[in-house]
Image (spheres, grey):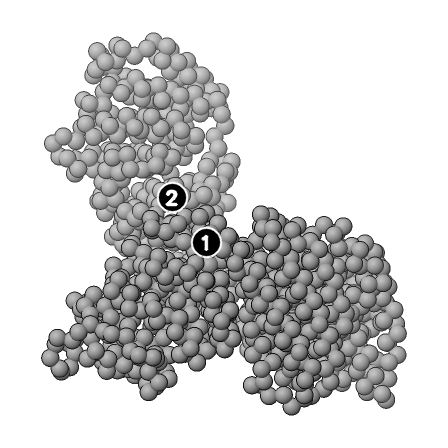
Amino acid sequence: MQPLPLANDNNSHGPPPPRTRDHAGKWITESDYSYIVSILHKSLIPDEHRVQAEADVFQASLRHGYVSMLWQILHNQHEKHTVRMLAATEFKNAVVRYWNPVKEMNHFAISEQEKSRLRPHLLSIIHSISDEVMFKLLSVSIVSIAKGDRACSWQQLILELLDMLDKDASVHLKVLMLFNQLYRQLTSKLVVRSSERSRPTVDEFSRDLRQLSTTRVLPFLTHFFQFYLRAFFNELSSVTPSISEDHSLFSIARILSNCIKILHRLVIRCCDESNTSQMDELFLKTLLTFSKDVAKYHHDLPVGHYPLKFVMERLLYVSMKPILRILVVPALQRRYSKHVIDFSSFCLYEILRYDPHSTAHSPKMDAFIVRCMCILNDLFLLCDPKVYMHLFSHDVIASFLEKLILCYMKISQAACSTIDDLPEEYITSLWEDDWTGSLKTTAETIYLQALDVFPNASSFVQHFIERLLNETYEQSMNMSNPDACQHAMLTRAACYNAMGWSWTALNLNLKFKDWYMNQLRHELSFSHSHRVHLVIQIKILWLCGKWVNDFDQECRQDLYDRCVSLMGSSSLALVLSCVFTLNDFIHDQQFVSSDFHHAHAFLEHLLLLLPRVHDESCLLKMLSLLGNVLKKMNHAMDPFMSAFLSFFEKLWYINRSMLIKRSIVEITSIWLQALSDTSVLHDLIIMMVSFAAREEVYLMEVGLELWQSALHCSSLLTPGLSSLFSILSSSLPSTYHEKVLKILYSYLLLGGFPFIEHHLSDIASLLLFILKSNSLDPPHYLSLSHIVESCLLVNANPSLCIHALSDFFRHVVLLMLNDRLPSSVLPFFFTMFARLLFVSPESFLFVFQSIDSVHFEPAVVRFLRSWLSVVHDVSNSHHLKLHALAFISLFSLSLPSTFSFFVSILSFLVSVLSDIEQSNPVVMIGMGNHIISAPPFDMSSITGKNEFERKQLLLSCDPIFHVSSSSLLHSISSFVSSFSSSHPSIFSSTPSSLLDSLHRLGSSISSSSSSSS
């Protein structure tokens, strides 16, 4: 190919100037060819110059002429193949980004001049590019251009490709590959950027695509497909076992494969009820005939035709895709219902005929059968049974289930070796019930679906399995005939596998206790050196875990005995199976720890087993088991505490998996709840929390939860726990602010005044930082106000605490005055300021004076007006008394601007007295979302061993808690008397009804106090 003309080079020769962003948009010239090749080559070499080379490539991509230069490089046969391949990749990336750029994302665009030079040469790749990977990259580029280029539209491209198919047989395969890429893009959901006003809307695009596809493309390609079908079968008649891979038959097969992919997209995306050409129907009918003929030829081919067999298997695999996609779209399912049934019948026939254990097939044949099973599974799941039930007579159902159980769900002899070679992977995959898409797991899925769909299927399976187990028992014991013995054992293992999967369908009819006691437990007791017998025992143990709900106490005890006994086996796979089965039973709701008499022996075996496990998934399963043991049998762990603790520490250091570390953290949290003395875990906790605080993605959340649990369960603030406080800083992400606040509150309760005094500056800084963040929810505000209130309550030197928190108070006031706090959180902060007023009225006044030393009274008035508007939302009697006493303290400041609120405040005081007089006091204590209601308690019973008791202690230290109704009445009466004498003119406007209510409440409270005395 002739190189594309580049811009004229008017620069003198010499090294190119350094590439900086200043060169973005400038033209690349002929003299830059060597430089572009050089930086492409350097960017492929993993050395210290690679980063700079990649930066240079990026800078070059922002210069006009870059894509033209790449076009020349990738066509230059003298350049290294790796450089040409990178040039093709860069060409594709540049076209996708800059040919039709989204203005909001890219400020650079390929010039119209360069586009016009490239457009006439784009389709030349069909003749000039022989490398298939490079051709696919360039195909993506051409499709990307065609989707949004008016001068080279997708409609024009489709017509040109059809014309090439019609005129030049030598390029059919490449044209179809490009066609396939084009329709893959055009039929995707995101095909139009509607922000571009010059492009059609999505609806117009879909209409245009459907019209062109159904009138031109579908008829042409359907006939084209039929033509190559005839050519394919004509070639088949003359093939020999020695056929080479350059035979024309293989090219025809690839053409057919691409045709099917394109036509299937046309049928799925472009055909609807308005399509009257019937070409879609013709394609599906032809495809089914083709699939049946290929399957017949494949089945009849003698041994030795392996290349041809593999080609046919790939064709069969591709041919199943259209019907699989049709099934999941209800409208298509209705339109093509006849084809759905015909394909389903074909799939059923192939499933019944296939031998999954034959070595004469390629993985593609397994994949083809998987697709056949998926078609039937979707048929059962998505279609009305009336549609397909006529395909499945009683005999067909029986044959289908027998085939699934004895062939597809049966473990192969080769797979048995994984029990010894990869025991951890084998057992973990069995217990996790992974749907991996393999032939075996797909068969198990459709087996369960068939049991659910077909009446009496479960009854047939039960009798069929019982018969097989009886027939194969003697053969499985006959070691004189090893082949027959192994076959019988594998059959028995398949039966137990089927029983395990179908427990939900069979548990109504099967008397499981009799079956277990008469058969299963004897299989577990049988000791034999044959590897396949291990498979049987492992399957039975797995089956028992599935049927755990059907075990009565007698069966459970028997299974416990046998599992603990088998844990002494030399087979790691068998020991793991016993452990996982016991985990299923320990996790079960019916498990009673007192009935498990083997706890000591079980934990001893577990300690010996843990160091032998190295697979991550298996180890996670083991750690999950330890968590269940701690929850259900925590006292049994006491003798082994130091051993397990040592194992956890060692595992933490040697294992780099974040999932393993996360699991250890979660188990330690559970362990904390089970121990009476948690100090033995503090060293481990400190190590884990320190590490977790640096791992936001995997460990930070569980690490903070562990930290909080350690503080909750501790009775003393140890030096180790105290040293962790330095981590609790503003560096932690804002998503964890709620947990940070809860941990801080736990520290306040645990450490008391000495802790607050030592860390007061850090506490104030952290609270202010969190308050200023923009990601707070109501629980955060509640925690903030509660922590500050606790600091004022616990601190033996309130003035010192208030001074440290002055910036925090000032910021809260500004937020409240500027209406920047949600209305739902205002009561929290007014309660906090009520505490401040109660402790130190002068400090309250100082907060407002620090905002505006001259005109602070209007701010106080606005604050007080807002306070009175929400104070009635406070329902906690303890807080109501605090607000009442705070209002009285406010008037002790003698601010003239507040006197006008006397009547409103007196009304609130009377309502508080009335509420307290009419109800029994209930103490409400809490933190965050966790509010605890408790009746009055005996202070002598409080020991402070955990956080709940410390909250009670904190409340008992609150002077407000000890304010009786008579004391509150005395304070209110003194306040009214003082105000009436000092401001008689204002007091005279007080409604007489309000004063009468106060007098009546006073008499009632006084008489109650006298009676009590």
How busy is the neighbourhood of tag 1: few (under 14 within 10 Å), some, or many (20 plus)?
many
* x then y, percent, for residue 25: 20, 65
The amino acid at mark 1 is His
Residue 971 bears which disc, if any? Answer: none
- Residue at 19%, 23% in the rendered image: 897
Quadrant in the rendering for residue 848: top left
* x then y, percent, for residue 981: 23, 14
Who is closer to the viewer here, 135 or 998? 135
Who is closer to the viewer here, 160 or 557? 160
Quadrant in the rendering for residue 151: bottom left
Marks 1 and 2, the one that precedes in the sequence: 1
In the displayed structure image, the side of residue 518 where residue 1009 appears, left or right? left
- Residue at 34%, 68% in the rendered image: 120
Hey, which residue is sitting farthest front in the picture?
A: 167
The vertical placement of 543 against 911, above or below, is below
* Local SS, label 1: helix
Name the residue tied to disc 2. 777
Say which of marks 1 and 2 sits in front. Answer: 2
Q: Can residue 712 be seen in this view?
A: yes
* Local SS, label 2: loop
Who is closer to the viewer here, 760 or 293? 293
Residue 712 bears which disc, if any? Answer: 1
In the displayed structure image, the side of residue 979 where residue 782 appears, left or right? right
Quadrant in the rendering for residue 260: bottom right
